[in-house]
Amino acid sequence: MSPTYRFSYGPKLVSGPGSAAGLAELLPPGPCLFVTDERLLALGLMETALAGLREAGIEPRLFDAVEADPSRETVMAAVAAGEGCASVVGFGGGSPMDVAKLAAYLIGRGDDLDAIWGVGKATGQRLPLTLVPTTAGTGSEATPVTVITVGGGEKKGVSSPMLVADWAVLDADLTVGLPHDVTAATGIDAMVHAIEAYTSALLKNPMSDMLAREALRLLTAHLGRALAQPEDRAARGAMLLGAHLAGVAFANAPVAGVHALAYPLGGHFHVPHGLSNALMLVHVLGHNFHAAMADYAELGILLDPTLAGEGLQAQARGFVEAMATICRRVGVPTRLREVGVGQGDLDLLAREAMKQERLLVNNPCPIGEADARRLYAAAL
């Protein structure tokens, strides 16, 4: 860990059950591009938020065509829908929030999307942006990153401080109706963010470590409760906060190998992002074990204080085993074959994972194409 580092705290935060009703207080006058998806619209989750905007005289221009693994075409359609808007709200999981981030930037700045892929290339001024997560998983409301699916199932990202929202709204009421499988997979997703931030090779720092540890503590302590008692707003709120803190952590100490291997599963097999992370987590932890042993040991003690009297390797092994146990207990699929991946797909997945250079450089130890294929094979 370098003694010199920079840290960004991310968006301002509003938190509490029902807080999405007050969105209008966070936005400037004028029409608002409201980015979401059809499923959330059908569930009626945004009715209170939309009513609050209308009562305040802010016209919400609804864009609900965001799909899982949103495409470049979807982003550009959102930009067209938002022409003339004064602000942007992203309401939903990671996909609507990612589209909202790019739309706010492209409407405000007018840049060509193809000119800003990568890190630090989006430097202009975006529209005012507020993000409202409806899952406790992606942490996208806290990060400067957006990921879009382009031609051939490949995922590309834009990472820039200009994509950090002005406000994030954590409203536990919006998550109480989440299905069991979504709560489980997104909860694991948030844990992966915390773990990969804590072990990030290049930009790990004391601030990101502090947030990653607290995120993992909150998430592991409350996921079981949120699954067993879906309307427990205290547990749901703790999950949202844990996911948010993990987002702030990995916005500063970026994610790595688990995500690099997860992205091809989403791009080519349409596996939900949280589930794809869960499928690869334990295998990548094993690959990184010796390089990240000291960090894993610290996280092992965090999850099980009785490990404090054990040796470093036992502590680290306890952490890996604890994460494997959590994945089993929450009931997410644990094998790639359960999501339609076969032996004949391994070469494609390994090649595609190598395109995620911005993530692979953060891994505690190298992952080459042969390593990636081996890890996918282990997950079959």
Image (cartoon, rainbow, N blue to C red):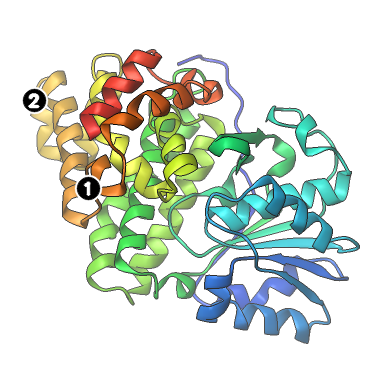
Looking at the picture, tell me which residue is in the foreground, 121 or 371. 371
Q: Nearer the viewer, mark 1 or mark 2?
A: 1
Q: Is 82 left or right of 1, judged from the image as shown?
A: right
Q: Is 372 left or right of 151, judged from the image as shown?
A: left
Q: Is residue 309 above or below residue 328?
A: above
For the residues marked 1 and 2, what is the alpha-carbon distance in whole angstroms? 24 Å
Mark drawn on residue 198: none
Q: Residue at x 35, y 61 (%)?
A: 183
Give the image location of residue 148, x and y in percent: 61, 43
Residue 367 seen anywhere in this rendered image of the structure: no
Give the image location of residue 5, x and y in percent: 58, 21
Looking at the picture, tell me which residue is in the foreground, 266 or 162. 266
Q: Residue at x 31, y 62 (%)?
A: 181
Q: Mark 2: which secondary structure?
A: loop
Give the image location of residue 62, x and y in percent: 72, 72
Pointer 2: what residue? 310
Q: Residue at x 46, y 75 (%)?
A: 173
Q: Mark 1: which secondary structure?
A: helix
Looking at the picture, tell me which residue is in the foreground, 372 or 49. 372
Q: Earlier in the sequence, mark 1 or mark 2?
A: 2
Q: Quadrant of the N terminus?
A: top left
Residue kind at label 1, given as amino acid type:
Cys
Res. 293 image quadrant: top left
Q: Residue at x 22, y 40 (%)?
A: 323
Residue kind at label 2, given as amino acid type:
Glu
Pointer 1: what residue? 327
Q: Do the residues bearing badges 1 and 2 touch, measured as CB atoms within 8 Å?
A: no
